[in-house]
Image (spheres, grey):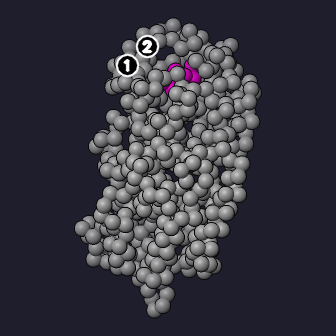
Amino acid sequence: MNVRKPLAALTATVALLAGVTGCSANSTSGVIDTKADKGLEVLGQHLTYDPNHLVNDGQPIELGYWTWGDASTDPVVSMLHEYEKIHPNVTFKISQVAWSDYWVKTPLSLKGNRNAPVLFNVHNSQDALLRPHMEAYDIDLDDLEADYTNVGTHVVDGKVDYIDSVINTGNIYYNKILWKEAGLTDADIPTTWDEFTEVAKKLTKFDGGKMVQAGFNMNGDARYDGMWQGLNYQRGTLMFDKSGTKANYDSKATRENLQFLLDLYEKDKVGSVKFGDNSEQSFGNGQTAMVYAWGALQGILDTKYPDIDYGVFPTPTFTKDVPFAYDRYNGESTPGINKHQSAEQRAVAQDVIRFLLAGDDYVRTAVKLLNSFPGKKSLQDDPEILSNPVMAAIKPRLDRLIWPGPTPSTLESSPKIAFQNVFQNHQPIAKAVAAAQAQIETDMKNSDFVSLERMYQHYDEAKQD
């Protein structure tokens, strides 16, 4: 909904700090808010937020928010600014902590430290570290589920500590100039891997025996280690066994998919391990025609390689039939609330969360900054959002994307080693896959992780290897 008066007309004070700083539960100085009726409309549909009330009885209060991002990468930052405009007695101290330090400093600080933040950025891969310190959202679960996708995957004991603001998955990025030079048109966009292979051949160039243009490039980080899960899901194979605790990497699907990818390089000659070790850079420089990547690549290309003319199409499948799942997805998490902080701070933090989730601006900002698909249902048909090719590629596949939960990092690092052993060290596929499975089991020996694959609405269609 549109507000009746510009938010900019209200007073705002924002403190953006470079280092980790604390905050007091209540400020002794600052603006006292006496105007409960802000003249603003109620936000939201099922989950609503009425801004026409006093927060903390209108008394000045200061809250900390920790993040590894900034206003250009974390949508919460700008929304805290907006919240201060509505409730001028509230001041946020926003502290940016480097990603490498965040997962050490944040869990330690949250443990009863009076200088710890009451709000903090969450990444679901670190769920085990953060959840013991998180207060559940004081929001009706039915309202939340009515407005947002995939809420159920985050429900624990009937409550949620965070949900997905936006989600993302893999797609194929292609160079439009190279595509046209090869005589290809939109009609040639492949929907199956067999079609993809033929297109990749047309996009590959050699000078004598030397490859000078790769049709498809998987070299570097986050290519195979981000791709294997989706390929396995396409074949109907789960990442974990029925118990949800034992990894299923050493499977027929994994071996078949590795062979398929190896054939692309060694049989079909559309790529090569000798064609550099950074497919992202190669694509940006116009030397690679196609790569598999998630939405983050769009931001990288727009920033580092602004001259590249590229398009996006959905990842192909092995047949024309709808697969068990097209790919894995992952979500960008909403903020967490520190349950160890004062009752006054936690009450304001709960109000902030309701403000974020009820309106559209937070999710719209997240879509733009994170190049990810809106988790909010009311925005999933938005024409402006769907004008982005990544969003348009994700939309038709939304109900056939699966989230296995906050899987341990070994499910990416160990398969990556298997890929390197097969492609670079010429190790037999079965041996490389078995070694990776053993490493995964060793790494997960003391893990309490349980897969959420069982919550996927098409779970019963999965094959048992």
Closer to the camera, 64 or 231?
Answer: 231
Closer to the camera, 53 or 227?
Answer: 227
Which residue lies under the disc numbered 2?
52
Image coordinates for residue 152, horizontal then vertical, percent = 47, 36
Indicate the secondary structure of the residue bearing disc 2: loop
Q: What secondary structure is the magenta-colored segment mainly?
A: helix
Gap between marks 1 and 2 measured at Cα: 8 Å
Query: Compared with residue 434, is residue 42 higher up or lower down, i.e. above or below?
Result: above
Image coordinates for residue 281, horizontal then vertical, percent = 52, 67
Residue at the far left in the pictured view: 187
User: In the image, 78: left or right of 444?
Assistant: left
Magenta region: 348-355
Query: Compared with residue 169, is residue 270 higher up or lower down, i.e. above or below?
Result: below
**Image quadrant where residue 413 sits:** bottom right
Which residue lies under the disc numbered 1?
42
Residue at the far bottom in the pictured view: 208
Closer to the camera, 408 or 13?
Answer: 408
Q: Amino acid at mark 1?
A: Val
Q: Is residue 436 at least partly visible in the picture?
A: yes
**Which residue: 40% across, 22% down?**
48
Labelled pair 1, 2 in contact (Cβ < 8 Å): yes
**Image quadrant where residue 92 sits:** top right
Say whether residue 353 is magenta.
yes
Indicate the secondary structure of the residue bearing disc 1: loop
Circle 2 crowding by C-alpha within 10 Å: few under 14, some 14–19, many from 20: some
**Which residue: 47% across, 12% down?**
53
Q: Amino acid at mark 2?
A: Asn
Image coordinates for residue 173, horizontal then vertical, percent = 40, 63
**Which residue: 33% across, 34% down?**
378
Image coordinates for residue 306, horizontal then vertical, percent = 44, 60
Q: Is residue 221 at least partly visible in the picture?
A: no
